[in-house]
Image: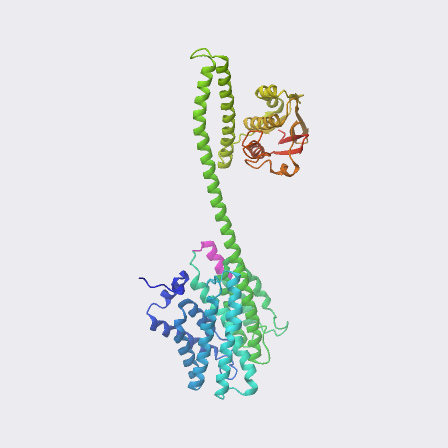
Amino acid sequence: MTAPVSTTEQRPELSFRTALFSPGYFGQVVTVAILYVLAALAGLRFDAVSGFASLIWAPTGIALAVVLLAGPRIWPGIFVGALVANVITGAPLLAAAGIGVGNTLEAVIGAYALRRVPGFQLRLDSMRDVLALIVVAALLSTMISAMIGVASLSLAGLAAPQNLAETWRTWWIGDAIGALLIAPLILVWAATPRASLSARRIVEAVVLILGLLLASVVVFIVSVSRGGGPLGQAYVFFPLLMWAAIRFNQRGAVTATVIVSAIAIAGTVNGRGPFIQPTLHDSLLALQTFMGITGATFLVLGASISERERSREQLREAHRIATAANRAKAEFLAVMSHELRTPLNAIAGYAELLALGVPGPLTPKQADAIGRIQSNQQHLLALIDDVLSFAKIEAGTSPIAIGAVGVAKAVDSLEASVRPDLERQDLNYVWKGCDPALVVRADRVKLRQILLNILGNAIKFTPRQGRIELSVARSGDRVSIRVSDTGIGIPAEMVDHVFEPFFQVQSGTTREYPGVGLGLAISRDFARAMGGDIAVESVLGKGTVVTVELAAA
C-alpha cells in the first residue's frame, strides 16, 4: 500500500525546494543556517538596541519563506543560524539559545498558521493570502520572537529594565518589516510559475528598474533635506510602485518595494534622505515604519491586480467555452435541419404527383387527404427553415449583402405569398402603397424574410375577419415599415421577451397557435445586421404593431 503524500509535498509551487535544497536534508539545514547568519550579522550592524534588537531584520522573512517552501522540518537550520549569529555578536550561549528558540518558533508557528488559512497560496495573488500574511505572520507571530528574545536578554543581564519596552518594540518592528518585505520577495519569485516576457515587456521592466534606481538615488543619496515631515520626498515612489504592481503584478510590486527599501536604508544610515532624525535609531524607525506601510499597501494592490486579471481570464475562458458550445449547437441544428428537409422534399414531391393524378385518379376523400399532407408538409418545412436560419445566424454563416432596395416593390411582392392564408382566415389586408422612389439600405432576401415573418405572425394571431395593415413612413434618414393587426395582443409583461429565441406567449402542448418562436428572433438579428432594428408595441386583446426601422439609401 502506498504511503500517503503530505499536503506540503503535493503543492506544485514547492518545486523551489528541489531547486534550492537538492543536496539533501543536511544540505538544506546548512544552507538555511548560513543564509540566516549572514542576514542576521548584517542586520545587527544597524544600531541594534541592547545590542541584539535591530530595526532591519531580514532573517525573519527568510525563515518564514523557507518554512513555507520546505516545510517545518527545516527548523534546525533557523535555530542553528540564530544561535551562531547571536554567539558571534557576543551573547552568552544560553541567551543565544533562547533567542534561537524564539526565532524558530516565530517562523514555524507563523507558517503553520498561514497553512491553516483555507486556500492559502504561496503566490500571494489574492487578498485573502496577503491579509493573512500581514496579520498572522507580520503582526502576530513576530510577537513570539520579540517576547522570548527580550526575555532571554533580560535574564542574561544584556538589557537594562528601563530599555525592555524599547527593545521589544524595536525587535517586533524589525521582524514585522522583514516578514512584510523579504518573505513575499522569496515566496512570489519561488512559487509563481515562470512566464516568458516579450521584448517590449523586458524593455518596460528595464525602464521601470532604472526609474526606481534614479528616484531612490535622488531621494536617499543626493538629497539631504530635513524638511517636509517624516514622509518628505518619499511620495515620488508611489507612481513607480503602482506601475510595478499594475504592469507586473505581485512580482513587480514586491521587487520594486525591496529595491526602494535597500537604497533607502543605505541612504538613511549615511545621514541622507527625508527620514533623518537626531539619532540613527529614530531615523531607521521612521524609515521602517514608512516602508512597512508601503510594503503592505502594495502587497494588497498587487493581489487585487492579480485577482482582477485572474477574473478576466476566467471570464474569457468561460466566454470561449460558451461560444464553442453555441457554435456546436448551431452546427448540429443546421445539420439536423438539412437532414429533415431531404425526406420532406421527397414527401412533397410524391404528394404533388398524387395530387396531379399521375398514378391514377383520386377520390374526393383521397384528394382531401393529399391536401392535408401537403399543408402539414409545408408547415413543417417552414418550421425547419426557421431553425435553419437561426442556426446559420448563431454560427455566423448567414451572409448579409447590403444594397439599395426599393420599399414599394419589396412590399408589393409580399401579398402573393400571404394571400392564401389571408383568404383562409378571412382577414382584411390593407396596403396603400408608398413613394416608389423610397429606397432603403438592406439585403433584399433578408428584408423579404423579415416582412414575411412579421406578416405570418400577424395572420396567425389575428382572429377571423380581423384587419392587418402595412404602412411605410420616412423620418430623416430612417425608414419605418409598420405592420399592425387587430389580433389577440401580447401581455405587457411578455413584450420584452418576444425577441428571445423559442419564446412563445402560449406554452405547453395544448397551445392554440403553432410555431417554434424563432420568427421575431431571426427578424431582429437580420434587421440589426443591416443597421436597423425592430420594435414591438402591443395591447392585450386589441392588437400588435411591429415596426421595422432601416436606414434610407
- State left or right for residue 347 relative to residue 277: left
Q: Residue 466, relative to residue 394: is it above or below? A: above
What range is drawn magenta here? 196-208
Could one spot residue 22 in this view of the protein? yes
Residue at the (66%, 33%) spot, across then down: 538
Q: Quadrant of residue 521?
A: top right
- State left or right for residue 235 relative to residue 189: right
Q: In this view of the protein, which residue sits in the foreground, 43 or 239?
A: 43
Whole-percent x, y for residue 378 in the image: 51, 23
Whole-percent x, y for residue 342 in the image: 43, 26
Q: Colour scheme used in the picture?
A: rainbow
Residue at the (42%, 83%) spot, across then down: 87
Could one spot residue 90 in this view of the protein? no
Q: Quadrant of residue 41?
A: bottom left
Q: In this view of the protein, which residue sits in the foreground, 525 or 90?
A: 525
Reply yes or no: does residue 345 show up in magenta: no
Q: In this view of the protein, which residue sits in the foreground, 241 or 164?
A: 164
Q: Quadrant of the C terminus?
A: top right
Whole-percent x, y for residue 91 in the image: 45, 85
Whole-percent x, y for residue 105 in the image: 45, 76
Q: Residue 422, relative to residue 152: is it above or below? A: above
Residue pushed farthest top?
Answer: 361
Reply yes or no: does residue 201 show up in magenta: yes
Residue at the (49%, 72%) spot, across then down: 178
Q: Main secondary structure of the magenta part?
A: helix
Q: Quadrant of residue 523?
A: top right
Looking at the rendered structure, the number of numbered marks drawn on it comes to 0
Q: In this view of the protein, which residue sits in the foreground, 504 or 525?
A: 504
Q: Quadrant of the N terminus?
A: bottom left
Residue pushed farthest left?
Answer: 1
